[in-house]
Amino acid sequence: MQDQLPWPAGQRLLMCAPEYFGVDYVINPWMENQIGKAVHALALEQWANLRRQLAREAEITLVGPRAGLPDMVFTANAGFVMGKRAVISRFSTIERQPEEKLFRAWFERHGFAIAPWPEDVPFEGAGDALLNRGQKLIWCGHGFRSGALAPRVLEDIFAVRTVGLRLADPRFYHLDTCFCPLPEGWLMYYPPAFDTRSQETIAGLVPEEKRIEVGERDALLFACNAVDLNGRVFMSGASEQCLSRLRVAGFEPVLAPLSEFIKAGGAAKCLTLKLNEI
């Protein structure tokens, strides 16, 4: 599939078609006992549906998939973008490390300046680095895939306050699996995914009335692995209680089931990378 250019003004997302997607190895708890069990035809259908839904709110551009890299579909892990600067992910697992040069080539080809990143500091892009929507800061998860030094390195590169959050539950191995900053300073998240100090940090920075705390059921539905675009929140699944809380907060939730990708540990947010965060 070809890259789509030029980009118009407005929201822009990077996606990768799931031509070679499957659960071919185990690098997170969701993949356990799932090797070979993802239904490819259904995955294609679910991804296409998500793309159609997102295309109503944003321009979708594509990076080409490669055989042997089934997780390349999760473009949130391509890197982290602010303006026209990008940090390319430094994958912690050998299975995904071949993606690095492919994503680097894509960003270079599309005019992004590549910021240097230390060889010895794991960092998995927008899976673990999310911009706060209420005040200018970067939330950076660490503990499973990104290193404890990642927040400091990000802050040095972008000169933006970066707040580290330690992940404590291996099921939520990336920040974006359990933490979703929303416009106007709202936050949807699953508190038990974080250690006590990080929970306190979140509570100190996000007012209680702006925090949408989800329970384990919604967390396991990947409700927090959502994409916000123009007041709409695209997600694989959520309870009616969670959907109602989003509506009361002024958002319009949009369900796009992604069961096959959840078998690999990702959903809507994992399948996208915002290219114009600022």
Image: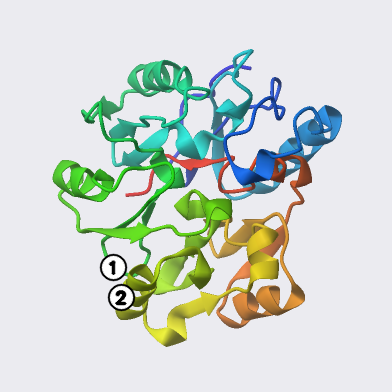
Q: What residue do we see at 70% from left, 59% from top?
A: 221
Judge whether residue 132 can be spotted in this image: yes
Disc count in the image?
A: 2
Residue 70's x, y, as percent?
A: 64, 24
Placement of the N terminus among the 4 image quadrants: top right
Q: Residue furthest bottom?
A: 209
Residue 250, above or below 10: below
Residue 88's x, y, as percent?
A: 34, 29
Residue 260's x, y, as percent?
A: 76, 40
Q: Nearer the viewer, residue 134 or 6?
A: 134
Which callout, 2 or 1, points at the residue further toward the start of the chain?
A: 1
Q: What residue do we see at 63% from left, 45% from top?
A: 29
Q: Give the amino acid type for the residue marked by disc 2 in the picture.
A: Leu
List the residue tagged with mark 1: 135
Residue 120, above or below 65: below
Side of 186 relative to 204 (left or right): right
Side of 34 relative to 242 (left or right): right
List the residue tagged with mark 2: 205
Q: Residue furthest top?
A: 67
Residue 163: give its label: none
Q: Residues within 10 Å of mark 1 (few under 14, many from 20)?
A: few
Q: Give the amino acid type for the residue marked by disc 1 in the picture.
A: Gln
Q: Nearer the viewer, residue 56 or 103?
A: 103
Coloured how? Answer: rainbow
Residue 28's x, y, as percent?
A: 58, 41
